[in-house]
Image: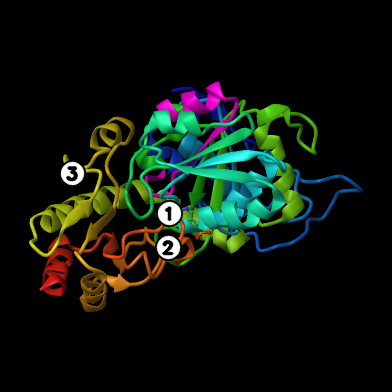
Amino acid sequence: MTTTSSDHGSEHPDWTRTGFSTRAIHAGQDPDPTTGAVVPPIHQVSTYKQDGVGGLRGGYEYSRSANPTRTALEEALAAAESGGLDPARGFAFASGLAAEDTLLRAVLRPGDHVVVPDDAYGGTYRLIARVFGPWGVEHTPVDLGDVEAVRAAIRPETRVVWVETPTNPLLGVSDVAALAEVAHDAGALLVVDNTFATPYLQQPLALGADVVVHSTTKYIGGHSDVVGGALVVAAGARLPGGLESPAGGTDVAGAVGFHQNSSGAVAGPFDAWLTLRGLKTLAVRMDRHQANAAAVADFLAGHRAVTAVLYPGLASHPGHDVAARQMRGFGGMVSFRAGSEEKALAVCAQTQVFTLAESLGGVESLIEHPGRMTHGSVAGTSLEVPDDLVRLSVGIEDVTDLVADLEQALA
Ligand SMILES: *Cc1c(COP(=O)(O)O)cnc(C)c1O
């Protein structure tokens, strides 16, 4: 293993060459050079003493521009997504949607066009259609499972192909490598919302994506106690359509950094610290999440009150083969159809271990009705979800308790 010297003389492996959990636990998180604290401190501070005008220590000047706790998270996230590749750049934000907003402002201009999944996360669709729409950005919803349909939706002004896989809440799967080729043939960026899969199960940059988006609120934070978002930009990603960054140059990372500082929707130090703590245990949590989800999906598939189960791990799922190829496992989210809206709402009201709540990815199991809850923002659009759909975020409790809870709720 190659080793790298840190500033204070100790040596450590080149984290980009280590396994996923080693990177998640160590990259960007060297012990504190002054005290040896093994966890990066919460630098709850807004400004930094300068040694003479412009004499910055470690580049820190003002915490919107950079904060050491946030830097630790940004480096760890970049390492998590880019193991084995040239180092990507990470950026941490106040929420997943703040990350998306900053990215879209950095890479789009009025008159540009975006291809979006026809079952995108409702908040992503609302942002693109209702916030960016009035600023002159057009979009086309497409079934991303159909690569030729994506190619047909591309226009001369297309600058971004937005991918979510698996999707929220229908668990649709799309082929990231094939879509990267389509986007790049058109001179557009391929952006992947990797929230559901997490960097443990799927690494879009290695499949050709230019930018990865996360709601770290979900699995990366993992404990339903912090809202946050992230962007990880591939080394060498260039702005589409000959665009120049206001900061100069044409690299996406430079433009995102400029916009992060200029718009300021950054993650605060305590939020960054909680997210970093979550990231360290991501792999062990995901292993349990997906083992439990597989058992829950099997149980639901055999239940007469359930008309369909949507889980990429089931051989019957249309995206099963692609998911098996591009993911390390099938994740912890399971959706199912209850036959009618009335029955779906009744199941949501009856569970005792699954908590009725929005969000996902925490250690505790959650149940929700997307049509009336998380996806209310797409009602009446082509992204509307079926009214008998129930979404489960399968937690890491004992699986027998989870199955028993669903059994009594369905009865
Ligand atoms: C929750 C979510 C978002 C938005 O993230 P926030 O942290 O809630 O702003 C984006 N994409 C997906 C897939 C999500 O589940």
| Mark seen at residue 314 | 3
Locate residue 287 relative to residue 32 in the image: left or right. Answer: left
Q: Amino acid at mark 3?
A: Leu
Locate residue 364 relative to residue 64 in the image: left or right. Answer: left
Looking at marks 3 and 2 on the same chain, the residue that comes earlier in the sequence is marked by 3
| Mark seen at residue 178 | none
Determine whether label 3 and label 1 are within 8 Å by CB. Answer: no
Residue at image location 32% in from the left, 62% down from the top: 363
Is 188 in front, or is 113?
A: 113
**Residue 383, visible in the rendered structure:** yes
Residue at image location 62% in from the left, 47% down from the top: 71
Badge 1, how many Cα within 10 Å: few under 14, some, many 20+?
some
Identify the residue under disc 2. 375
Image x and y of residue 378, in percent: 46, 60
Q: Nearer the viewer, mark 3 or mark 2?
A: 2
Image x and y of residue 207, in percent: 43, 28
Q: Nearer the viewer, mark 1 or mark 2?
A: 1
Residue at image location 50% in from the left, 34% down from the top: 153
3D distance between C-alphas at marks 3 and 2: 24 Å
Q: Amino acid at mark 2?
A: His
3D distance between C-alphas at marks 1 and 2: 9 Å
| Mark seen at residue 383 | 1
Is 8 in front, or is 56?
A: 56
| Magenta stretch contains residue 193 | yes
Determine whether label 1 and label 2 are within 8 Å by CB. Answer: yes
Give the secondary structure at mark 1. loop
Q: Which residues are magenta?
A: 177-198
